[in-house]
Amino acid sequence: MIITIAGKAGSGKTTLAETITKNFPHAIHVDLDEVNTQLLTTKEVRVQALSIFGKSVFKDGILDKDSIANHIYNNKELYDDWCNYMKALCEENVLQTIEKNPKSLYIIEHVLINQLSLFKKSACNILVWLNEDERLKRVMKRDNMTLEQVKNREQFLVPYDEKIFNIVFNENEKVDILSKLTMLI
């Protein structure tokens, strides 16, 4: 079974995923940012990055996430091409993991999870949100970025349609998310 969690950076996706994982037997937390990072070390991704960006995204022979970010967050076409490529690889990776252990409960989180077929396969889709000022402060502190850098990184994000989610959650509200999930799944 799959539960997906979407939300902007700093909204509380990981915190919620960890809470759910601790409270449900056989739950496995999958952060697609971590899957993405692991995939950057594969030959396939390195070759693709070289063909798209050239050598500028490599530091000491290692594919550098920050260098890729500098390219894609300043060019919508590159952003779309790279994100679509990596989303497909991440999803393929996760689906292979699920096939190997289909009886587990997978808690899958990512800012773009609602754009993957995993979202449609999910028993419950959760949108996590947080007051925008609070969220931005959290991201700036956590990622050591300026407000301008955060806004640049998020400039191509498409707003979420709350209607496609089973639950819209804010960690500051006193909602018993675990009870809601138990009823839904």
Image (spheres, grey):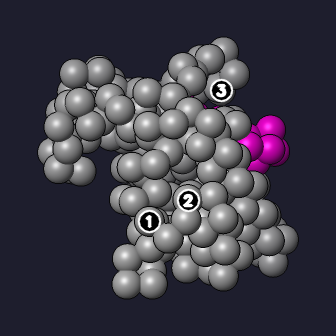
Nearer the viewer's eye, disc 3 or disc 2?
A: 2
* Closest to the observer, 97 or 35: 35
Disc 3: CA contacts within 10 A as few (<14), some (14-19) or many (>=20): some
Magenta stretch: includes residue 123: yes
Q: Earlier in the sequence, mark 1 or mark 3?
A: 1
Residue under numbered circle 1 = 56
* Label 2 secondary element: helix
Residue under numbered circle 3 = 166
* Label 3 secondary element: loop
Which residue is drawn at the image coordinates 59% and 43% (left, top)? Answer: 78
Give the amino acid at mark 1. Ser
Which residue is drawn at the image coordinates 60% and 69% (left, top)? Answer: 50
Range of magenta residues = 116-127
Residue under numbered circle 2 = 53
Which residue is drawn at the image coordinates 55% and 49% (left, top)? Answer: 109
Q: Is residue 18 visible?
A: no
Report x, y in % for residue 10.
Answer: 33, 40
